[in-house]
Amino acid sequence: MAPVDDARLWPGRPHPFGATTRHDGGRVVTNFAVFSEAAESVEVCLFDDGGNERRHTLPEHTGWVFHGEVPGVAPGQRYGFRVHGPWAPAEGHRCNPTKLLLDPYARAVEGTVRWDDAVFGHGGANLEADPDAPPDDRDSAPFVPRSVVVDPAFDWRGDRRPDTAWSDTFVYEAHVKGLTRTHPDVPEHDRGTYRGLTHPSVVEHLQSMGVTAVELLPVHQFIHRRRLVDQGLRNYWGYDSIGFFAPHNEYAASGQRGEQVREFKEMVRSLHAAGIEVILDVVYNHTAEGGRGGPSLAFRGLDNASYYRLDPADLHRNIDYTGTGNSMNMRHPNVLQLIMDSLRYWVEDLHIDGFRFDLAATLARELHDVDELSSFFNLIQQDPVISRVKLIAEPWDLGEGGYQVGNFPPLWTEWNGRYRDEVRDHWRGRGGSLGEFARRLSGSSDLYATSARRPSASINFVTCHDGFTLADLVSYEHKHNEANGEDNRDGSDDNRSWNGGVEGPTDDPAVRALRFRQRQNFLATLLLSQGVPMLLAGDELGRTQRGNNNAYCQDSDVSWIDWSAVDWDLVAFTQWLARFRADHPNLRRHRWLQGEPVVDGGLPDVAWFDPSGHPMTPEEWERDDGVAFATFLNGEAIAGTGPHGEVRHDDTFYVCWSVAEGDVAFTLPSAEWGAGWVQVLSTHEPAPPAPVTVDSPRWSAGDQVTVTPRSLVVLQRLPAVST
């Protein structure tokens, strides 16, 4: 369609980016502003309800920003951009005005990609054979989604962020759709949506487990890749973002244009009212456009050379540190601005409490090496908005030197991959250093203390969305990803799992009992460790993915939580552990354990004993065949004060850990450590633990406590008897 009379357009403003509305007398006017260093001109394309398109050339160009105001354009308007500029792949430029492009700053997106060769700037040509293939002249508009002008008004009703201290935080990693897709209490039309996540039954479940923050898998607008769609699969996890400001439209219950923004805000408001923070898993390291053979949906067609890292030796090619085909160009100021503007928008306008950054090492790459003082981290450090929310790094990527656990700056917490690996290895009885396991239990000071961080820098997890669920971790030794259509080649082979002697489901009562105990061991370890615990949604329910350890494309009952098959004993055990942790500051310390007295003449804050009741020696820590030790956690020696400056005291615990195949007799240490002890937890006994009563098992100094195979026992010190 030919452009309309562009004389109707007003000059508008170069900022803010995206589409913003204002009132001019009795008229609504929308300003459009978009960055492109490559473009010669940019058209804003407006679509009516019948799909008819009206094109306007943006009249002004300020500092690589094309902008103009269109009178009469109001919230709800669908739009996109067409960019006129060079098609010069050898120079990194891929402008093609026949391709309708999303606004990088769009607050909402309608529709998704309908795969056709027309969505590719080169028409689907084989770019390996012909990297300089000519541009395709077919119109992509019938096959691509539209940006939507959004009304930002919303009644937050006095919403206040919970602002939970890191040391009090318990993270629950969840998928918006998977959490409620089969929940019987959630109305059918709300299941798998933002609205479903705030149903009273769901919120009550989260509160019953002491969850203080839900960490949602990606909710930025994403697409389903062509290969998956052709195989009848979907991009379930959502790690293919195409809109960094837009809540994903498929998670809206109403299905109406732009309503996903309102429903997302309602979700945040409801969770905040329940005392639960909302953390987003965000993917700024790459986009859904893939490598050079991918579609032109937004960034590639706007300014390929600015938005993406290109190989300086061959500008046809993208540099890829993520395994997805491209990496965002963190060296370009407008790319950094895009990410920072996006983060601030989610915090200020949508009231988000924090972010988990996918493959965060990629964001730190200035030239090649990962640099913790990169521009991105400098911007975060000085930003008055983003520096005050929770920041979590997935501290690795797929590039050389990309494993950066422990190397992020002081503001950051990290997914502690070494915690996951060591805890898995320990409970499967791999053998090796007990010292490594003890370091993870005590907060991983070897990783974080030297950079002025606290134990809360460690996000402790045993399972997450990527890998086996907890039930599968104790039921499978090998991945079973055949349903993904890649001949079981995808997914990690390094699962560090143990099936108890049988691969997959079994009716053997001994194996089933062992697996239940192992799940209790993992959950207890997670909630007894210093640092911040993170639980994968459904692990407390007994959720299985039937051995699939890479369910990224399984938008099905493989990935959805099955609320009809809940292990209520495991739920009760998890609830007990969460309450126990919340009740005891001894288990969630602000400062590092030192192994020294906090007050003169007192006992150390932590001590480690062998099963004979003697302090562990360096040789015992490093023995390859070590299977048992005990931890003394002194509740009378908690460094630091409470929120009102109060001295913090708590109960003292003695935890006996054993991965032995047989019983282990633990001799309790001498009376100076505790004259009397009572059992509060044994993972070998039915769940949940019984309340402590006069009939609970009790021991005195020097007594022996029998710990059964592959289990742990928590003892609580009894008050001293006055004489």
Image (cartoon, grey):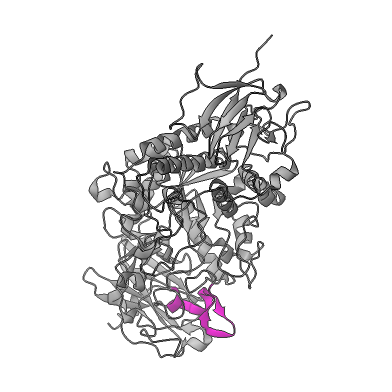
Instruction: Please name the residue shown 75% across and 35% down the image.
Output: 596
Front-lying residue, 4 or 383: 383
- Is residue 431 toward the left or the right of residue 138 in the image? right
Task: From the viewer's side, name the closer residue of 104 and 61.
Answer: 104
| The one of 176 and 425 positioned closer to us in this rendering | 425
Q: Is residue 549 above or below residue 333?
A: above
The x, y position of residue 205, in whole percent, is 38, 38
The residue most toward the front is: 662
Q: To which quarter of the image does residue 488 belong?
A: bottom left
The mark total stands at: 0
Furthest residue toward right: 600
Where residue 362 sits: x, y (%)? Answer: 57, 66
Please indicate whether residue 143 sits to the left or right of residue 549 in the image. left
Instruction: Kindly tell me whether residue 644 is visible in this rendering.
Output: no
Evaluate whether residue 319 shows in this view: yes
Q: Is residue 602 above or below residue 71?
A: above
- Image-quadrant location for residue 674: top right
Q: Which residues are magenta?
A: 299-320
- Quarter assignment of residue 1: bottom left
**Residue 93 at what x, y percent from top left?**
48, 84
Q: Is residue 598 above or below residue 718?
A: below
